Image: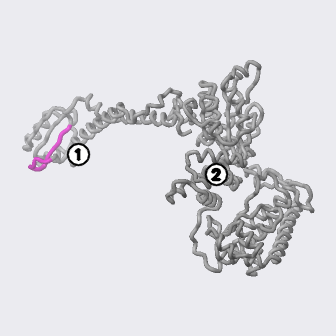
Amino acid sequence: MANSQMDNSNNEEQDPSQKPSFPSQRDYWLWLAIFFTLLLYFSNNLQNDRRTDTISYSEFITRVEESQVLHVEIQGKELRGRSSSTNQDFDFLTVLPDFIGQDLLDTLSTHNVSITVKPSSSPVWMQLVIGFLPWLFLIALFMYSGRLMQKRLGGGSGLLGFTKSRAQRFDTKQSGPGYDEVAGLESAKQELQEIIDYLKTPEKFLAIGAKIPKGMLMMGPPGTGKTLLARATAVEAGVPFFSISGSEFIEMYVGVGASRVRDMFEQARKEAPALIFIDEIDSVGRVRGTGMGGGNDEREQTLNQILAEMDGFQPEEAIVVLAATNRPDVLDPALLRPGRFDRKIILELPQKQARIEILKVHTRNTPLSEDVELDNIAAVTIGFSGADIENLVNEAALHAARLNKQRLDSDDFNYARDRVVMGAERKDLISKGERERIASHESGHAIIAFYAEHSDPLQRVSIIPRGRALGMTEQLPSEDRHNVVEDYLHDRLSILLGGRCAEKILFNTVSSGATDDLQQATQLARHMVMNWGMSSTLGPVGFRSGESHPFLGMELTEPREFSEATAKLIDEEVRQLLQQTEANVIKLLTQHRKDLETLTKALLDHESLDQQQITELLTNNNPVVIAQNNVN
């Protein structure tokens, strides 16, 4: 994408092999003319300013009559005088009236004042030119700078192209990523294949009366490749690609965004067939009429113009609008109806096979050691997006470069995964008491995870501070999970409360280290009660909470779907669920207190334990094996 040729918004053809020179020869001549004009202007002013005082004509006559003037110089209407016998600069300057004649000369002669008469320095027209020329050049400089800035910003007519589209036009026939370079997303690529066929041969569809979708909305989490897929679609179709972010429409003044929308669609119509891509469309496409300040604002005017432009497409206009968002729930219903964004393409986080393909793409130019298995890396990156995987490979390469390695090995990828998921190690100075409490806390999580029947397999326990965490208990799902059952959720609650309960058993007190655990557990329990019907008292009822709604204005006007009595009952159910889970966890940890103490001591000795070491320790109670196999 970075190697593609970008055209100006005024659609002028440029040779991609020629780079515009700046400044050009015309610019040098312009600046040279301005320099000499200003030099002439200021030199003239400096000559005129060679004085210490400007006095009135009457005061000048008074000085002559008091014999304070020794010499005068008359040049046109200006008279300069000197009161000392030196040949230095004149002391004063006065302007002669039009009626002055022989009487002035007689007065000067009477008081022995020497007189020098010089011709006028320049004609009147020259003085006018010298006076006005610098201002003319300043105006010309402002206009030239404005046109230059307008060109740089992709504008056309108007002040600095302020109302013109900021969309970047890419000539996809030059270069760019195709579908071969977009790993995964097979279902999305199949959905877009029809659009590619239409943009290549629109007459085939028009001949049988088929109407291609005007717009397609790509929805998915950040980093799943929405922008990359849109660009690759334009490359596959071989049509001009106009790319813009939704926030680039919005300005301070109402109407500017709508004008930019009109200009962008006008440019696309001139080059049809074409593809328009609006990234982060939720910045302008949010539900209208929900804000606190009314509905007549710039964002809503821009959205109205987008709707009007998409309605104005003629059947023969081969223009398709692609939009991307990770917040489809906030979009205006008018934007999603048939005739505008007819189709919705869902981009999910990549599955294992897709992650393998993405890893192959990002490691094409990266030398790998023989011990690196992409299948293993894909297995431990569940929940990673395409952008996360790219960052993982980059972090591994940076780590290998710091160690002066020629190839990336499995240790580099393990380090990179830990850094991406948990953050960098922090060399904090933790006291002995704090270290023991952290070890007991993480041991509590690990013991519950080890004995839980429906939880994810335990992978590693560590008391090495990383990021904002002082310790870490890592579990890794054995497969991609799209749905969770009630047993799994109850085990998850138990694991979250395991650290706090372990502190209570070993130290008879609790600490603030369980803050995040309690927040996660409370949120999970509330979801189980309110959203998933996992409450024996409330039954299979779902209650919507206002926390997830993005608009304050709509929240204030929208009534709650349940009464105060129901809200009180929900709170009671959540509290009972957490209290019952805590009691079960304390009972389980008490039964395995010996394992808890053994694991705590092993963590204090070795700081980090992997799955094999934890299994041997808890099943065989063999700390010697731990010491021999410890990776640290």
Q: Residue at x 82, y 64 (%)?
A: 491
Closer to the camera in the image, 59 or 536: 536
Q: Vertical placement of 547 versus 436: above or below?
A: above
Residue lying furthest top in this view? Answer: 207
Closer to the camera in the image, 526 or 170: 170
In the rendering, at what x and y percent does residue 501 appear? 77, 74
Q: Is residue 619 left or right of residue 61?
A: right
Which contiguous range is marked in magenta?
78-88
Task: Tell me where residue 520 sits by quadrant.
Answer: bottom right
The CA span between labels 2 and 1 is 79 Å
SS state under label 1 = loop
Q: Which mark is residue 320?
A: none
Q: Are marks 2 and 1 in contact (CB under 8 Å)?
A: no
SS state under label 2 = helix
Q: Which residue was labeled with disc 2?
A: 388
Q: Which mark is residue 55?
A: 1
